[in-house]
């Protein structure tokens, strides 16, 4: 593994001259490595879940994640945030968001790697698994780009399903990034924005007030005129905006292009950019429709259900993405611990630090295993009813727990690096700001927990399918066997279930993770996971392993040389 001394590739001044800045105990930058080759758990999961054919793609993206120049561009894109230019110098409305060149370079790399599209263009079975692996790796590169790529991944099937917008869905599969603001027909590839939320609506899309009036006919594939104000737009420079609006027949889902069929600009207006805690390279905004032309996707009254089709895929993407965030944070912390010395030993060899790092590694393994298993369910859902049930109940469950775990996890890894982790020149500060976001958009924690219950109520077999997944590990660990019985009893208890939803969904996700690890991870790792997360129920703190048995093996696996 090659390492460098500065995030910009610049050699330090004065090194070795005996002056006050002669540094002998500062770890090198983690660069010049391959994030795929350094991750045995990802390699195992990619092959196990049916997408071994994508290993070359994953390895290429893993090299990108470890490339010093790409890391520098990620830092530049987040330090030089997008700027909104509503008018040109003569007062003409232009509605342009201007990005630092590094952002465009990163978008070029992501689309070339098919981070946005591989689930739909895969040459073999396992497209969702392969795409989840790419998302996991891309979130170790730069997270703002993960928004438009994730939105495209989710929007393709929704656009393809409607003949009037199917060509837009196909154009979204393009791999040649084209940032120009021109009509869709002139572009090599397009991107999409999702804008559902309004000031007074939040997750309750039926409370929104944006209206849609039919131009001629009503229903699927027909043009409507939209009027209203959307409070969050995910990536406003997208060529198509997916949006909800109220029709006479109830909520509808619409696709509003930035240009009209005659080539003129649509009446979709960016009103301003959000000053966000994280995800800074990506331009989130609030927008306004003033009789904006849009195509209805599905029928009047089906808008919320159709929107949830899109959201279902992004929820899996956020679970895989948060797992990737945690993976990079763990890699940084372990790398730092191997190179930084204190009390005559490397930090990683200090008993309590090794406990903390190994404990952190358990969550990465569990989150990755769960995300990849649910991705396989999506791949198999069309041919297998059990897989279809897992594909319905799995994404909100994985989104809840993986995204909920990430902020506390990354706070701990940041602390492992001390003050060096807290400064903006290090990637850890960016990850720390980024971590809470995936738990918010596409349904906050309470919403997705309730969606797990809705999936179980609409199809009781969905919950049974998860129980069966846990039971596949039966006999391998007595504590897990007992917990598998207890969780069934807990879900069978109808009393106050909504009030207990977080506890129940967390427990279900952890047991599914444990079952996967028992079957597929080293015994030292799965035993520690069950002891801390199933038996002791862990809690918010890390460093809770009872003894050092297996710690060296866990840490070696956490960042393979």
Image (cartoon, grey):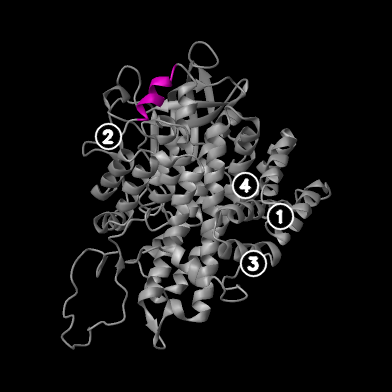
Displayed quadrant of residue 127: top left
Describe the element under mark 2 as helix, strand or loop.
loop
First-in-chain label (4 vs 1): 4
**In the rendered image, which residue does mark 4 sit on?**
397
Which numbered mark, 1 or 3, is in the foreground of this view? 1
First-in-chain label (2 vs 4): 2
- The answer for how far apart the CA atoms under marks 1 and 2 are is 54 Å
First-in-chain label (1 vs 3): 1
First-in-chain label (4 vs 3): 4
**In the rendered image, which residue does mark 3 sit on?**
532
* Residue 499, percent from left and from top: 75, 52
**In the rendered image, which residue does mark 1 sit on?**
475
User: Residue at 51% of width from left, 50% of height from top?
Assistant: 438
First-in-chain label (3 vs 2): 2
Q: Callout 1: few (<14), some (14-19), or many (20+) C-alpha neighbours within 10 Å?
A: few
Q: Which residues are magenta?
A: 164-173
Residue 326 seen: yes
| Closer to us: 11 or 340 | 340
């Amino acid at each position: 593994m090659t390492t460098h001394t500065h995030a910009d590739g610049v050699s330090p001044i004065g090194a070795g001259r005996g002056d006050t800045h002669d540094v002998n105990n500062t770890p090198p930058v983690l660069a010049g490595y391959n994030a795929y080759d350094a991750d045995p758990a990802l390699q195992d999961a990619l092959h196990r879940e049916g997408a071994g054919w994508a290993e070359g793609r994953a390895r290429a993206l893993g090299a990108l994640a470890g490339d010093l120049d790409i890391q520098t561009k990620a830092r530049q894109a987040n330090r030089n945030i997008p700027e909104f230019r509503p008018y040109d110098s003569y007062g003409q409305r232009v509605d342009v968001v201007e990005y630092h060149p590094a952002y465009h370079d990163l978008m070029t790399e992501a689309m070339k790697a098919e981070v946005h599209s591989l689930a739909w263009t895969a040459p073999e079975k396992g497209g969702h698994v392969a795409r989840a692996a790419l998302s996991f790796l891309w979130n170790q590169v730069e997270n703002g780009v993960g928004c438009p790529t994730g939105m495209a991944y989710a929007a393709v099937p929704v656009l393809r399903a409607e003949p009037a917008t199917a060509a837009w869905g196909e154009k979204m599969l393009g791999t040649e990034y084209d940032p120009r603001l021109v009509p869709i027909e002139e572009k090599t590839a397009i991107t999409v924005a999702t804008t559902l939320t309004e000031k007074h609506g939040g997750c309750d899309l039926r409370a929104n007030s944006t209206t849609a009036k039919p131009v001629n006919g009503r229903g699927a594939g027909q043009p409507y005129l939209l009027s209203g104000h959307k409070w969050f737009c995910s990536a406003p420079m997208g060529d198509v905006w997916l949006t909800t609006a109220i029709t006479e027949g109830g909520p509808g889902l619409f696709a509003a292009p930035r240009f009209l069929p005659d080539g003129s600009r649509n009446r979709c207006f960016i009103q301003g950019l959000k000053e966000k805690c994280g995800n800074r390279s990506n331009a989130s905004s609030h927008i306004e429709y003033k009789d904006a032309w849009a195509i209805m996707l599905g029928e009047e009254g089906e808008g919320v259900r159709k929107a949830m089709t899109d959201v279902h895929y992004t929820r899996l993407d956020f679970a895989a993405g948060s797992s990737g965030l945690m993976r990079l944070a763990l890699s940084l912390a372990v790398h730092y611990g191997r190179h930084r010395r204190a009390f005559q030993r490397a930090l990683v060899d200090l008993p309590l630090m090794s406990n903390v790092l190994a404990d952190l590694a358990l969550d990465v393994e569990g989150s990755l295993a769960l995300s990849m298993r649910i991705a396989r369910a999506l791949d198999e859902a069309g041919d297998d009813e059990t897989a279809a049930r897992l594909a319905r109940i799995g994404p909100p469950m994985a989104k809840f727990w993986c995204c909920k775990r990430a902020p506390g996890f990354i706070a701990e890894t940041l602390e492992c690096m001390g003050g060096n982790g807290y400064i903006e020149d290090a990637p850890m500060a960016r990850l720390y700001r980024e971590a809470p976001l995936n738990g918010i958009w596409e349904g906050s924690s309470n919403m997705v927990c309730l969606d797990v219950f809705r999936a179980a109520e609409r199809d009781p077999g969905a919950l049974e399918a998860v129980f069966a997944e846990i039971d596949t590990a039966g006999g391998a660990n007595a504590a897990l066997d007992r917990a598998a019985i207890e969780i069934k009893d807990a879900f069978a208890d109808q009393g106050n279930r909504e009030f207990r939803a977080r506890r129940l969904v967390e427990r279900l996700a952890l047991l599914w993770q444990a079952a996967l690890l028992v079957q597929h991870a080293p015994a030292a790792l799965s035993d520690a996971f069950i002891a801390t997360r199933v038996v002791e129920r862990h809690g918010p703190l890390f460093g809770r392993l009872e003894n050092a048995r297996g710690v060296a093996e866990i840490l070696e696996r956490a960042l393979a040389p």
